[in-house]
Image (spheres, helix red, strand yellow):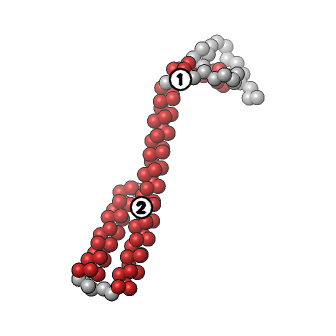
């Protein structure tokens, strides 16, 4: 998706450059046409930039969440020991504890 948006941004920037050239240097179009076209291209550019930035932010958020999840999973034992909770542990939390016993299975009953 990102390459398509970048291609669209480049196309619109080129359109804007050609419009300015036609108005300022070649004087091929009148001022009213120039303003209308410049506004249209500006709106399109804004929409594509917003979409492009939203996609970039979304992909960064996903990557950050995955990196954090991987860190937590790979360091669960150390994190559990370094940051003990001062509240009573639930059955689920006790079963994840590094001190959990793997004796006979107990039935888990939600509270």
Q: Residue at x 46, y 40 (%)?
A: 64
The x and y percentages for residue 69 are 50, 34
Q: How many marks?
A: 2
Residue toward you, 59 or 46: 46
**Residue 75, relative to residue 26: is it above or below?**
above
Q: Position of residue 102 (x, y in %)?
A: 61, 14
Kindly tell me whether residue 78 is visible in this rendering. Answer: yes
Residue 79 circle label: 1
Residue occupying image coordinates x 47% and y 32%: 70
Residue lying furthest left: 26
Q: Quadrant of residue 32?
A: bottom left
Up/down of 51 relative to 15, above or below: above
The residue carrying mark 2 is 49
Between the residue at mark 1 and the residue at mark 2, the CA separation in whole angstroms equals: 40 Å
Q: Nearer the viewer, residue 111 or 29?
A: 29
Asked whether the beta carbons under mark 1 and mark 2 sit within 8 Å of each other, the answer is: no
Of residue 38 and residue 108, the one placed in the foreground of this image is: 38
Quadrant into which the C terminus falls? top right
What residue appears at the point 33 percent right and 87 percent down from the top-left corner? 30
Can you name the residue that lies furthest to the right here?
Answer: 111
Helix, strand or loop at mark 1: helix
- Counting from the top left corner in percent of width and height, residue 104 is at 67, 13
Please indicate whether residue 96 sits to the left or right of residue 26 in the image. Answer: right
């Amino acid at each position: 998706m990102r390459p398509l948006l970048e291609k669209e941004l480049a196309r619109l920037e080129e359109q804007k450059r050609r419009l300015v050239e036609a108005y300022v240097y070649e004087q091929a179009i009148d001022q009213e046409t120039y303003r209308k076209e410049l506004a249209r291209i500006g709106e399109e550019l804004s929409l594509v930039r917003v979409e492009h930035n939203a996609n970039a932010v979304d992909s960064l958020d996903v990557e950050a969440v995955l990196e954090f999840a991987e860190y937590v999973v790979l360091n669960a034992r150390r994190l559990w020991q370094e940051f003990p909770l001062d509240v009573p542990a639930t059955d689920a939390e006790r079963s994840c504890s590094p001190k959990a016993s793997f004796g006979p299975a107990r039935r888990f009953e939600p509270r």
